[in-house]
Image (spheres, rainbow, N blue to C red):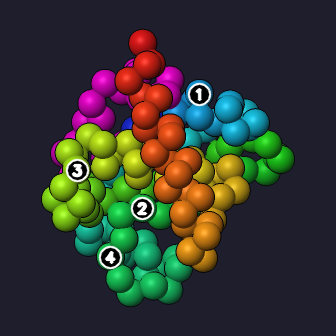
């Protein structure tokens, strides 16, 4: 099950049914089963406080992913996303908001299935995966 929540922002995922189906397809194509993902959309300040409290990082970020799974090959997690960061990133990258939103949504899933982006080569692989999966969104009915 994939659920969308708001913490301190008003936000609705465009086309939530299609988005959930797209995310489930990504999880399955990576060889995983889905238990539950909670996407929590929030502000910069809310995500900063989570970053400080749980990760001891004192900077803004667009996403924080918590893996709560107990079983191998099964996805369960909480993904916090700053709507403020997505808007700013989209502007800076000359992307439309919805495309940047898809990138961040899939980025969290890729973390849950085991991808990392701490090193340049790993970040490049994640970007390639994100781009590939974003290109498939249009084919979801």
Toward the viewer: 108 or 52? 108
Q: Secondary structure at mark 4?
A: loop
CA distance for labels 2 and 3: 18 Å
Q: Residue at x 43, y 38 (%)?
A: 134
Q: Residue furthest top?
A: 141
Q: Is residue 70 left or right of residue 114?
A: right
The earlier-in-sequence mark between 2 and 3 is 2
- Over which residues does the magenta segment extend? 5-22
Determine the image quadrant of residue 27: top right
Find disc 4 in the rendering and name its residue. Answer: 60
Neighbours of disc 4 within 10 Å: few (<14), some (14-19), many (20+): some
Find disc 1 in the rendering and name its residue. Answer: 25
Q: Residue at x 24, y 60 (%)?
A: 93
Q: Quadrant of the C terminus?
A: top left
Neighbours of disc 3 within 10 Å: few (<14), some (14-19), many (20+): few
Q: Is residue 89 left or right of residue 56?
A: left
CA distance for labels 1 and 3: 24 Å
The earlier-in-sequence mark between 3 and 4 is 4
């Amino acid at each position: 099950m994939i659920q969308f929540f708001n913490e301190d922002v008003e936000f609705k995922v465009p086309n939530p049914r299609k988005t959930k189906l797209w995310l489930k397809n990504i999880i399955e194509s990576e060889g995983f089963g889905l238990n539950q993902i909670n996407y929590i959309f929030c502000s910069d300040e809310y995500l900063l406080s989570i970053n400080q409290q749980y990760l001891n990082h004192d900077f803004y970020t667009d996403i924080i992913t918590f893996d709560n799974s107990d079983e191998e090959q099964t996805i369960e997690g909480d993904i916090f996303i700053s709507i403020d960061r997505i808007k700013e990133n989209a502007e800076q990258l000359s992307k439309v908001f919805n495309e940047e939103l898809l990138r961040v949504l899939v980025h969290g899933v890729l973390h849950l299935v085991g991808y990392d982006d701490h090193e340049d080569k790993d970040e490049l692989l994640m970007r390639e995966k994100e781009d590939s999966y974003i290109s498939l969104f249009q084919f979801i009915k």
